[in-house]
Image (cartoon, grey):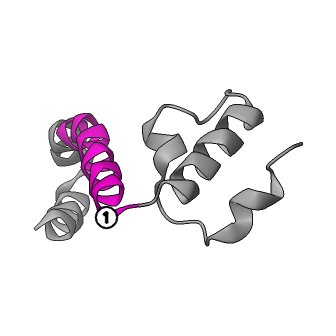
């Protein structure tokens, strides 16, 4: 696949342009490769901050759900979770 090896010019991170653009799971590898290479070629601090912001926003619904569910999981689990988020 054209451009596949090019995406290995940088180390993978915990998030990325492809992930915050919705390209994960059952999406085309060609689309993910294109997004990875777009990120590498157009890297800037602004893009990095945008990816970070979109990652945080993407996790907000998950954190809201955990805040509702965690107390139901039990006392020890809730305290462990609470310590992680504070």
Q: What residue sits 61% from the left and 72% below the top?
A: 11
Quadrant where the N terminus is found in the figure: top right
Q: Which residue is mark 1?
A: 45
Seen in the picture, residue 64 relative to 36 is either above or below; the reply is above
The tally of labels here is 1
Q: In the image, is 28 to the left or to the right of 80?
A: right
Question: Relative to 24, is 3 on the left or the right?
Answer: right
Query: Residue at 22% of width from left, 52% of height from top?
Result: 74
Work out which quarter of the rendered image holds the C terminus and state it: bottom left
Which residue is pictured at 73% across the width and 29% down the height? 28
Asked whether 86 or 46 is in front, the reply is 46
Q: Which residues are magenta?
A: 44-65
* Occupied quadrant, residue 65: top left
Asked if residue 43 is among those painted magenta in the image, a careful observer would answer: no
Query: Is residue 31 shown above or below 55?
Result: above
Query: Picture coordinates of residue 36 (x, y %)?
Result: 61, 50
How many other residues sit within 10 Å of disc 1, few (<14), some (14-19) or many (≥20)? few
Give the overall secondary structure of the magenta segment: helix
Q: Is residue 39 left or right of residue 55?
A: right
Q: Position of residue 12 (x, y in %)?
A: 59, 66
Please, which residue is most extreme toward the left here?
A: 86
Q: What element does badge 1 sit on?
A: helix
Nearer to the camera, 15 or 8? 8
Please provide percent x and percent y for residue 33.
Answer: 70, 44
Question: Residue at the spot x=72%, y=65% of the render?
Answer: 8
Give yes or no for residue 48 being in the magenta stretch.
yes
In percent of width and height, residue 9 lies at 69, 69
């Amino acid at each position: 696949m054209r451009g596949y090896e090019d995406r290995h010019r940088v180390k993978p991170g915990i998030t990325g342009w492809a992930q915050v653009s919705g390209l994960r799971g059952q999406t085309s590898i060609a689309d993910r490769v294109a997004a990875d290479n777009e990120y590498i070629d157009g890297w800037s601090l602004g893009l990095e901050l945008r990816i970070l912001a979109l990652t945080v926003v993407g996790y907000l619904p998950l954190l809201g759900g955990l805040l509702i569910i965690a107390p139901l999981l039990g006392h020890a689990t809730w305290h462990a979770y609470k310590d992680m988020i504070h």
